[in-house]
Amino acid sequence: MTNKLNNFKFVFIFLGLFLTKTFFAQRKIASEAIFAVQPTPTPTPNCNNSSEIYKKKYSQQSFYVPKPNDPVITLKITVHIFKPVEDNGRWQMNDNSLNGLPAMKSLLDSITNGHQERFSAKRRATYSVENFNSPYISDSKIKYEITNIYFYTVPELYLSQNDFALFEHIEKIDATRIEEGMPLVINANPGPGHLSSYKGNAAIVTSMSPGDPIFCRSHLLHEIGHAFGLGHTYVNTGGGGSDWQNFNGACGSDDYLSDIFPNNNPACQNEGQATNKPTNAPCLSCYESSPDTSNNIMGGQRYNLWMSPLQMGRRIRSLHFNFENGRNLRRFVKDMESEHKSVLHITSNEEWDFDIQLYKDIVVKSGATLIIKCKVAMAIDGKIKLEKGAHLIVDGGEVTTWCKSGNWQGIETPAVKKKKAGDKTIEPVYIKLHNGGTITKAKMQMPIK
Ligand SMILES: [Zn+2]
């Protein structure tokens, strides 16, 4: 990496070595850029993510495993294609060309709009372990959508591996393009495709062979998987980024994918063949590698379309928080109406010391108090409903919306019976604002005390 790139953090992990050792395997996805996946948000006053409720509930990928009535969240992706001067390379603008725009659109269509990015295949594996059956969920509740495909003809950037220069060029042409959706930047650079970032937001940079749409599809799904914080299910001798090693976290810790890696797996014969034999005691699970492999989406092989429930949970979690170390993804979620039926129930006192983006209404059950010390961003027409005897305290925090095209609804409190003249009964106070706490961009104007 050159000095110029020092302030631009990404990590390449080349798979060359691994490829040569597993030549008999299917073609692996060329990719890589990995980072710690553990929630490590940047602490701001009131928002240090240290509360018990955060650790036990909201930081857990299992909490976000999708349920049938959960809302579908759409991730916006904007495609930026760097072309050679003569329009004879990849992705020509000539619609009659085999390598032209229709082929690109057809490729992108295969992973967007509720096609293969949203619904998981069933698990298939070449090995079995007693008492291990990963639960199957079909609908991951996340889909991708392409906002636009932009072309750039810049000879010096066509083959460039300098991500930063690519992003800067796009921004210089039109700064809104880089904000419009997660950038998927395609040129003919000879390096591996990888997860990158620009100005704190996630981005992907890759080359793309027009002659192999199946590989390209698997590759794109895989790289976008990294943007959600997913790691490989195969071994990563080149560095971090392996979900099997739980990103070097302890076996069995929060982000362990127990629904992919069976413990005490006897089918670990390939572990000894790895260049640097990784250890994963005490779980004694195996990374997946041919011949003992599955069709997991992060397994690095074409046609792989199985997502485990915990992987789905992690994907959804990553759209709630901004903790992927400078790879904000939630900012690229498409505006949507809040889910009003499958809501988030608060059944006991909770103190939120974290910044969260929500897709569902909140119902604070009778007798419970929700204290908001940080930013809570609701979807369009989202509502926080307080049942009788429930309370909301915004203590230095803010309740607002994350959507740009509409406001959230506001806070609904139980109806108060009309008073007769002279009635001295004091109305209960449901909502309190402390320490500069605010409620903004709500449609309903509430009497706030
Ligand atoms: Zn990868």
Image (spheres, rainbow, N blue to C red):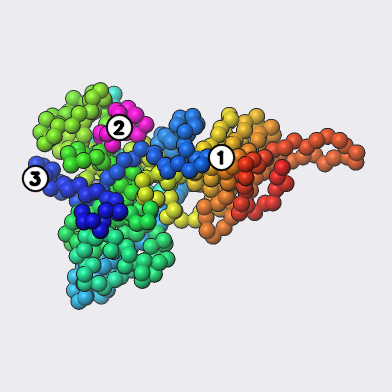
- The amino acid type of the residue labelled 3 equals Thr
Q: Label 2: which residue?
A: 249
Q: Give x and y (percent) for residue 448.
A: 70, 45
Mark 3 neighbour class, 10 Å CA radius: few under 14, some 14 to 19, many 20 or more: few
Quarter of the image where one finds residue 112 = bottom left
Task: Classify residue 371 as left or right of residue 446.
Answer: left
- Which of the two discs, 1 and 2, labels the residue nearer the N terminus? 2
Mark 1 neighbour class, 10 Å CA radius: few under 14, some 14 to 19, many 20 or more: many
Residue reaching furthest to the front: 3
Q: Is residue 88 above or below residue 137?
A: below
| Mark 2 vs mark 3, CA separation in Å | 28 Å
What label does residue 20 carry, if any? 3
Give the residue displayed 67% in from the left and 40% down from the top: 432
Which SS class for mark 2? Answer: loop
Which SS class for mark 1? Answer: loop
- Which of the two discs, 3 and 1, labels the residue nearer the N terminus? 3
Say if residue 187 shows up in the picture: yes
For the residues carrying marks 3 and 1, which lies nearer the camera in this image?
Answer: 1
For the residues carrying marks 2 and 3, which lies nearer the camera in this image?
Answer: 2
Say if residue 210 shows up in the picture: no
Query: Is-magenta flag for residue 161?
Result: no
Q: Which residues are magenta?
A: 244-258
Q: Give x and y (percent) for residue 357.
A: 49, 46
Most prominent secondary structure in the magenta stretch? loop
Task: Classify residue 448 as left or right of residue 273.
Answer: right
Q: Give x and y (percent) for residue 164.
A: 29, 60
Q: Label 1: which residue?
A: 373
